[in-house]
Image: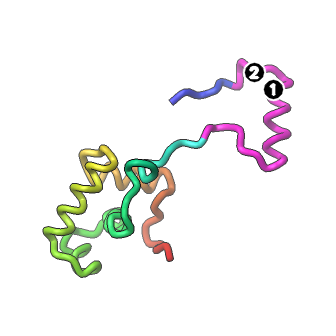
Amino acid sequence: MDSFVYKSAGIGELLSVIRSTLAGYSTFPAPVDSVFSGASALTEEEIQILRLVCEAKTRREIAAELYLSEGTVKRRIGEILAKTGYDNILRLAVHAVAEGSIVPGIKEE
């Protein structure tokens, strides 16, 4: 990811950024694409599964809560990993929580 170094920016440019920020515009940092957007957009069921993984639920617990078989949960996790490019569901869960895409314990309506 490219980043802008404000040490090398002039005073005028810094003031411009400050003024636009005060006016409600976001100028820095550039928005980062979420692993959940675009081609890797997850279905509602996949998001529910990932949310439960973020809550440290086992596949058995996830299956019981969502009324699915453990095999289906395992398959869906594989599909989630394939869509997002991650090789480990726990790494993806950490990323999802860190970027604020999923807040464990809070269900979206």
Q: Residues within 10 Å of mark 2 (few under 14, many from 20)?
A: few
x and y percent of residue 44 in the render? 38, 68
For image coordinates 28% across by 69% down, the residue present is 57
Q: Label 1 sits on what residue type?
A: Glu
> Helix, strand or loop at disc 1?
helix
Q: Which mark is residue 104?
A: none
* Quarter-of-image position of residue 79: bottom left
> Helix, strand or loop at disc 2?
loop
Residue interval drawn in magenta = 6-30
Dot 1 corresponds to which residue?
13
Q: Residues within 10 Å of mark 1 (few under 14, many from 20)?
A: few
Task: Give the side of residue 6 with respect to residue 104, left or right.
Answer: right
Task: Give the side of residue 56 with respect to residue 99, left or right.
Answer: left
Q: Residue furthest front?
A: 39
Q: Residue furthest left?
A: 71
Asked if residue 7 is among those painted magenta in the image, a careful observer would answer yes
Q: Are marks 2 and 1 in contact (CB under 8 Å)?
A: yes
Dot 2 corresponds to which residue?
9
For image coordinates 23% across by 68% down, the residue present is 58
Q: Main secondary structure of the magenta part?
A: helix
Indicate the colouring scheme.
rainbow
Vertical comparison of 85 with 1: above or below: below
Task: Give the side of residue 19 with respect to residue 68, left or right.
Answer: right
For image coordinates 59% across by 28% down, the residue present is 3
Along the line of sight, which residue is nearer the eye, 105 or 51? Answer: 51
User: Disc 2 versus disc 1: distance between alpha carbons?
Assistant: 6 Å
Asked if residue 31 is among those painted magenta in the image, a careful observer would answer no
